[in-house]
Image: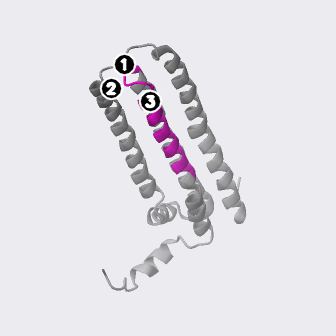
Amino acid sequence: MAIEGSDVTAHVRVELRRVWLIWSVLPLAVFLLALLACTAVYASQPVLSQKRAEDTFYTFLAISALVFLFAFTVDGHWTNPKRVTRALARQGETASAGAATSRIVVTSASALGVMGQAMGVAPILCLIGGAGVVHAYLLLSLAISYHLFLFSRHPYYEQVVEAAENGELTPEAEAGKKGKDPGPRT
């Protein structure tokens, strides 16, 4: 199915929202329900000593933060316009630039959603580990923030697809930029 012109941007917008709902929102809702069920089960359990509870929380917080930072870095790499340009050059004339870029950004968004599921599991594991309900819900708020971060990236993805469709992400454009003086360095 070939997609023409501005339809590519509209198509990628729909695909990104679909991917975000399937790989981010739905799993997060499932994790929230699982956390509520675990809260009911583990609420009556004795909480570890304050020091052990904090250590457990910090362990899962570090894991969640690491996933967040890793995903942030990977997203910047995968959707970098120079990398997208090289991918388009490798594909040649087989597909429109916008459709090829659309596949790149939708695949990136899907992978980042899957990474976010690790952050959704962390609050449940934290609660089961004995850190307490408050710490588990703090980790859940971090997971929610991560998935909102993913949603905030959608306008950038649309801009990359639109630039590719308009011919602004071509190897010729990159080659022309290499010949220019980069200007003063600070």
Residue at x-position 57% and y-position 25%: 33
Q: Say whether disc 3 or disc 1 marks the residue closer to the N-terminus.
A: 1
Q: Tell me where residue 105 sits by quadrant.
A: bottom right
Give the quarter of the figure containing the C terminus.
bottom left
3D distance between C-alphas at marks 2 and 1: 7 Å
- Residue picked out by circle 1: 47
Locate residue 51, reporting x and y percent: 27, 27
Disc 3 is placed on an element classified as: helix
- Looking at the image, is 50 positioned above or below residue 170? above
Q: Which residues are magenta?
A: 128-151
Q: Say whether disc 2 or disc 1 marks the residue closer to the N-terminus.
A: 1
* Label 3 neighbour load within 10 Å: few <14, some 14-19, many 20+: few
Residue 22 covered by magenta stretch: no
Residue 185 visible from this viewpoint: yes
* Label 2 neighbour load within 10 Å: few <14, some 14-19, many 20+: some
Q: Say whether disc 3 or disc 2 marks the residue closer to the N-terminus.
A: 2
Residue type at mark 2 is Ala
Residue type at mark 3 is Val
Residue type at mark 1 is Val
Locate residue 173, reporting x and y percent: 50, 77
3D distance between C-alphas at marks 3 and 1: 11 Å
3D distance between C-alphas at marks 3 and 2: 10 Å
Locate residue 86, reporting x and y percent: 45, 64
Residue 4 visible from this viewpoint: no
Residue 135 covered by magenta stretch: yes
Q: Dots 2 and 1: beta carbons under 8 Å?
A: yes
- Residue picked out by circle 3: 134
Q: Is residue 116 left or right of residue 13?
A: left
Q: Which mark is residue 53?
A: 2
Residue reaching furthest front?
Answer: 50
In this view, the residue in front, 125 or 14, is 125
Residue at x-position 62% and y-position 66%: 162
